[in-house]
Structures are given as C-alpha cells and as structure tokens.
Image (cartoon, rainbow, N blue to C red):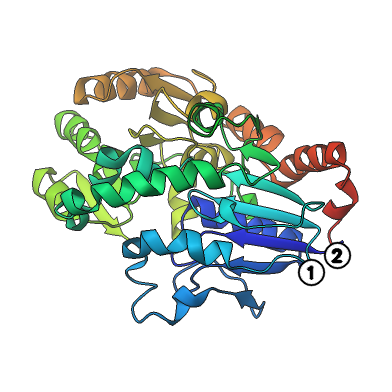
Amino acid sequence: MKVALVHDYLTQRGGAERVFELLCKRFPQADVFTSLYNPQATVDLGARPVHTTSLQSIPGSSKYFRLLAPLYYPAFRAIDLQNYDLILSSTSSFAKAVRKRPDAIHVCFCHNVTRFLWDTQVYLQGYREYQRLYPMINSVFRHLKKLDVKYAQEPDLYIANSTTVARRIHSIYGKQAIVINYPIDNSRFFFSDRKQDFYLVSSRLLSYKRIDIIIEAFNWLGWPLLITGDGPERKRLEAIALENVKFLGHVSDAERASLMAQASGVVVAALEDYGLVPIEANFSGTPVICFGAGGVLDTQRPSVTGIFFKRQTPDAVQAALLAASRTEWDYGKIRDHALNNFTEEVFFQRVEQVLEDLGVGATLTPA
C-alpha cells in the first residue's frame, strides 16, 4: 500500500510542523508532498525527498508565503496522487484539498479550520503588515471561503487535535471529527523537581497570545519572568515591561527544555485551539498557569497539572499566579499525566485503531 504525507507548507517551525515531523518519522517510506519547502526554516526531514508544487519556483515564495493564499488550492488540486492508496494530510488550511482515487482513503489531521478565512480580524491582529490590505482582500477571502468548504469535503475522515477544533470542523465544514490529542516529542524534554525562582513564557510574540497581560501581572508582582520567542509584538511588549521581565528571543531546543524543567511555572494567556506548550511543560514536571478555555480543557487538570484563570486580564493572571504559588505541586504526578496521555506511542495507538476501523490498519506498521 502506497502512502502519501501532505502538509500545507514547510516554511516555518510551529506546532503543526512538529506533528507532521512525527508522521514523517513514523512512515519513513511514505512520499512527502507540500506546496513550499524551505529546509533551513522548518522541521528536519534529513535527506528525504520533498515534492513541492509550482509555487516553489516563485521568487520569494517561502518568505512571503501568506501572500500566495489564492494560489494554494489550485496548487494542491494539481498534485498527482492517483497512485496512492492512503493519503494522510496535515493541515490548518489547504492540504485537505488534494485529490485521490475513488477507492483510496484520505485521513486529514486537521489542526484547525482555515483561521485567516473564518476568524480574519483576530488572525490579522498578529500580522499588522497585512491589516492594511484587508479591504482589498476581503472579496478574495469570500471566494476562498466557498472553496474552503467545497474542498473540505474531500477527506474521508477528520482527526482533530482537540474538542474545540472538532466543533469548528463540524460547524463550518459539516464534517464529524474524531478527537485524538496530538503528542510531542518527549525525548526533547527532561523532568526536574528542582524548580527555580522564575516563571516562563514560550511563544511567538503575536497579539492574540496576550503576552501583554502576563507582563502587566508580573510588573505588579515583581516576580522574575523569562520570555522566549520573537515576533512583531516584541518592541511593544519590551516597552511596557519592567526590569523583572527578560526577553531572551529565540533559544536553542536544549536551552528551552532546560528553562521548561527549571521554571516554577509556564504561563499561557492565549485562547489556543490545542496548544503544545502546556504539554511540554507537563513533561518537564512543570505546572501551567493558563487561560481556561480551548485546548487546555482537553490537556490540563486543574490543581493537578496547573491553574486556570477565567478572564484574559492582568488581575485574573495575578490571582492565578498567587494561587499557583500557594499550591504544593506533585511534580512527578504532573510528568506522569503527560506520559500517560501525550506520548507518540499513545497517539499512534489511537490512530492505528482508527485506521484499522477503516480497513487500513496494517499501513501503520513503521517500515
């Protein structure tokens, strides 16, 4: 049985790309397809061949890939997958549109519905250079919405990473989805029960991440806060931060893992559809102080692995931090929760059962 792995674009290194990397490792003999590929900017696929589309030949396409939005659906429809029996797509937008033989099976690992189409104003808050284009592109987006719904009917089965995403898939695309929480590569993280006197934010610096309210809370508390990651909001956030808040920019995977293990807590204020950072913190034995909505409702246990706050305000973050500081955490239980629910082994056991139900379970045996 021939297997094809398809991803939207490999031009960055985010949570969706990390999941696709796991799929590639699991199926070393599968062929890989994507619209654009920049090996220096994305996950490590080694010397593995990556089949791209005609968009790859456009100058600057990897850097300005968001500007190519109207071209992705035709590009994915043009990919020839007629020789493949099983297609596993990994998508937040376009890869679900690939065509298959009538007797082939297409399973879509959907990280989200196409956010820039269905949640445009919130999405563009993080990309100010595109906000001024909105009046011009609004009509284009209306057309793309119709295509998005049309091509969302292509997959035979959707696997959603969270209950929140499954609801969106059903609401917008009219498709049912099975919820299987995505794993992380836990080999990159290590456990420690010796916590240091600082808290950690690990995030792209985008407005919807609401790092501003975290900074305001720490300004008031005066506690040490370290922030890893970069993005268009950095200058604004640095301008409001006091001396107890330090911006580290991009750090190595090893340094990030060390910070995760040593932090008193990891703070997340965004409404995330799923969110890998809280799970990474849990693998490190570190509690999470987070906005109690979205994906964390699937992955976190209040007062066991973390503390929820109900409003995205500095006061609510402060109250949650104070509650966390008074909690006697069982760091080993935090780590065990992650090990029991979010390893690659657990993830692929659940996926294998789904594929067996579809009659293709043997395909999941790694080569």
Q: Give the percent coordinates (x, y) of residue 181.
A: 62, 36
Tell me which label, 2 or 1, sits earlier in the chain: 1
Residue at 66%, 32% in the rendered image: 336
Q: Give the percent coordinates (x, y) of residue 2.
A: 82, 64
What is the crowding at mark 2: few (fewer than 14 residues within 10 Å), some, or many (at least 20)?
few
Residue 349 visible? The answer is yes
What is the crowding at mark 1: few (fewer than 14 residues within 10 Å), some, or many (at least 20)?
some
In what quadrant of the picture does the C terminus appear? Answer: bottom right
- Evaluate if marks 2 and 1 touch, with contact meaning CB atoms under 8 Å apart: yes
Residue at 32%, 69% in the rendered image: 64
Q: Secondary structure at mark 1?
A: loop
Q: Amino acid at mark 2?
A: Ala
Query: Can you tell which mark lies on residue 29?
Result: 1
Q: Give the percent coordinates (x, y) of residue 165.
A: 52, 33
Q: Give the percent coordinates (x, y) of residue 304.
A: 54, 21
Q: Secondary structure at mark 2?
A: loop
Q: Quadrant of residue 7?
A: bottom right
Label 2 and label 1: CA atoms lie apart by: 6 Å
Q: On screen, 199 above or below 322?
A: below
Pointer 2 residue: 367
- 324 vs 147, nearest the viewer: 147
Q: Amino acid at mark 1?
A: Gln
Q: Quadrant of residue 199?
A: top left
Relative to residue 284, is residue 47 drawn left or right?
A: right
Q: On screen, 210 above or below 315?
A: below
Q: On screen, 264 above or below 74?
A: above
In what quadrant of the picture does the N terminus appear? Answer: bottom right
